[in-house]
Structures are given as C-alpha cells and as structure tokens.
Amino acid sequence: MELTGIARLRTVAALMVHTERLINRTPGLPGLGVFHGASGTGKTTATLVAGNEYQAHIIQMKQSWTKAYFVEKVCEEMGVQPRRKTTPYYVEAISAHLAVTDRPLIIDDAQYMLRGNMIELVRDIYESSLAPIVLVGEANLPIGLTKWENIHNRVLDWQEAYGCNESDAEKLAEIYCPGVTVAPDLLSAIVAASGGAHRRVATNLDKVKELARRQAVKTADLTLWGNRAFFTGAPPVTRKVEAFPGASAALARKAAR
C-alpha cells in the first residue's frame, strides 16, 4: 500500500491534524483525543499513517482482552519491562515511558475498552504521563464515553472520520487500479454503491482493474462496466433449492387425485 497516496485521503489527514493538535496543545489543556466513525471509513489505515508520521505507539484492542492483557501488550509494543508483572506495575512502566518520550499512544478499536471499567486504565496512564492519547473507535464511541465523566472531560478534541467521496476514490484508484484511467461516471457509481466505505471502494476498483486487463483497455467507464454488480457489502441472495428435485411436482399430482 502506498502511504504517500493513502496520506492524502480525508480521513487520514483528519487524524493527522487531530494527533498534531494533541501533541502541540497549550500547556494545561487535556491531552486525550477521540477519533470516531463508521466501519469502513479508513480509521485503521489512518492510524497506521499517523503512527508512522508521529512515531506513535499503536495498540489495536481486541474484544477478548482483559485489563492485564491490555497493559501487557502496551508494554510489549513499547519494549519496556515492569518491575513486577502485575497490572499496577505495568501501568507505572507505561506511564514512565510515555512521560520520558512524550510519544503519542493510539488505541484502535477503543470501543472494546468500554466494557467494565477498562477505560479507567487510559485515565491512569494519561494522568501519570500527560502524554497525548488518541482513542480510535466506532461511531458510538463518544456516546459510550459519556458514562465516564472523568474520561470525557479530559478530551481535548473530538474528530469524526470521513466517508469516501469521489476525491478520495480518485486517490484510491491510483493505488488499487494502477495503469487504468477510471472515468468520472464509473468512479461516481462506485462511490454511491459503496456507501462511502473505503474498503468497498477499494474492492470495486480492484474489480475494475481486472476487467480492464481482461478487455485490454486503459480506460474504464460505465459502458465498459455494463450491468455487472458492484460490491456493496450486502449478503448474497440465496436461491431456494428443493431438497428433492421433482418433489413439488409429485406432491401436486398427489393432491390432484
């Protein structure tokens, strides 16, 4: 994946501005940020680019993680060892490392931290380090955080991820459809069919690339695409198949007797 092209997407640029604001905030202001949006809007990709740009530590939460496993994975990412292998000492080691380096910590899929009181670990780490921390998660993350006032009032900036528009799709075409000019009519149709989801746009552009190669053309438009179905993310329609071929006809004959 070309980071140069990806970095020009609106969602990526928004997260980079968001992270930079936390890094360069006025002393005394809170240092937590929340970057939220619907699935498929490129948040994880943006996290990777912003992490690379600002040398941030990146943690991708999993639903199955516990408090102990979370702090262990953060220490593993940072390359630090706690004095003792218990949660308080892990938090202490994480905080000390962030306080010294002042590198941002980005937690992707942060909605999984809303279970129980896992999110309190973020407050502990932030209060002990005052380092920039970005919580990246689904669209409902801001609402979920309102349950924890001591977290909510430490947020400096709330930023929503952008859906894919035609400008973004043009940039994605350079990456996923190299060597093929995608006409505006086809690009517009792809964006509409994809519902603004970057992943679906990329998948459709890959289909365009394969079609153009099979047809040996350098330009693809709606005429070339024809009546082919776009990838929309909707589940396929399953045809109703008889368990025993001819059973319906046999039943109909029996009923007619």
Image: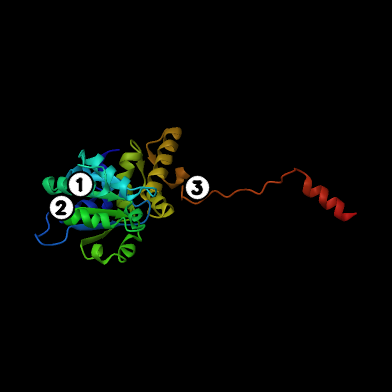
Identified by mark 3, the residue type is Ala
Give the left or right position of residue 181, taking residue 29 as reference.
Answer: right
Instruction: Look at 16% across and 61% down and name the residue there.
Output: 30
Question: Mark 3 packing: few (<14 Cα in 10 Å), some, or many (20+)?
Answer: few
The quarter of the picture where the N terminus appears is: top left
| Callout 2: SS | helix
Asked if the residue at tag 2 contacts the one at tag 1, i.e. Cβ–Cβ closer than 8 Å, the answer is yes
Question: Mark 1 packing: few (<14 Cα in 10 Å), some, or many (20+)?
Answer: many
Front label number (3 vs 2): 2
**Label annotation for residue 129:** 2
Identified by mark 1, the residue type is Ile
**Label annotation for residue 229:** 3
| Callout 1: SS | helix
**Label annotation for residue 94:** 1
Which of the two discs, 3 and 2, labels the residue nearer the N terminus? 2
Identified by mark 2, the residue type is Ser
